[in-house]
Image (cartoon, rainbow, N blue to C red):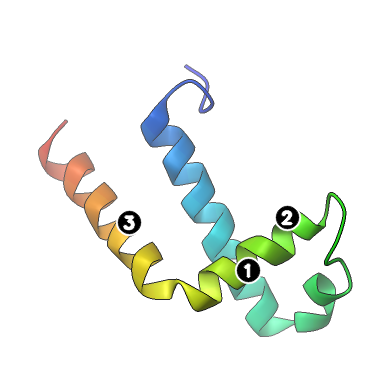
Amino acid sequence: MSAIFNFQSLLTLILLLICTCAYIRSLAPSILDRNKTGLLGIFWKCARIGEQKSPYVTVCWVVMAFSLLFMQ
């Protein structure tokens, strides 16, 4: 099944994108900072979410890990 049609896989994909963009921006901020608009601006926005909303992203990861370990 595709990740688009499975909600848990889609949530995993979004969380991985947010964390990856935040990590890349911490290593080399100039890569994401020059593309703040347009299609590549999505990556800059994901990096900002990962930096500013870090406790919420962490809670999402913990809830997802709990659901994968104990509910399936």
Give amino acid for label 2: Ile
Residue shown at the point (62%, 61%) measured from the top left = 46
Figure check: 5 above or below 50: above
Residue shown at the point (53%, 69%) measured from the top left = 50
Instruction: Specify the label residue 56 is tagged with.
Output: none
What residue is shown with label 1? 47
Query: Quadrant of residue 44 in the image?
Result: bottom right
**Badge 1 or badge 2: first in the primary sequence:** 2
Residue shown at the point (79%, 71%) measured from the top left = 32
Few, some or many residues within 10 Å of mark 3 (<14, 14–19, 20+) = some
Helix, strand or loop at disc 2?
Answer: helix
Helix, strand or loop at disc 1?
Answer: helix
What residue is shown with label 2? 42
Give amino acid for label 3: Cys
Q: CA distance from mark 3 to mark 1?
A: 16 Å
Q: Is residue 59 visible?
A: yes
Number of marks present in the image shown: 3
Judge from the rendering whether residue 2 lies leftward or rightward of residue 63; answer left or right.
right
Judge from the rendering whether residue 25 lies leftward or rightward of residue 57; answer left or right.
right
Helix, strand or loop at disc 3?
Answer: helix
Few, some or many residues within 10 Å of mark 1 (<14, 14–19, 20+) = many
What residue is shown with label 3? 60
Give amino acid for label 1: Ala
Figure check: 60 above or below 25: above
Q: Residue 11: percent from the left, percent from the top? A: 43, 42
Q: CA distance from mark 3 to mark 2?
A: 20 Å
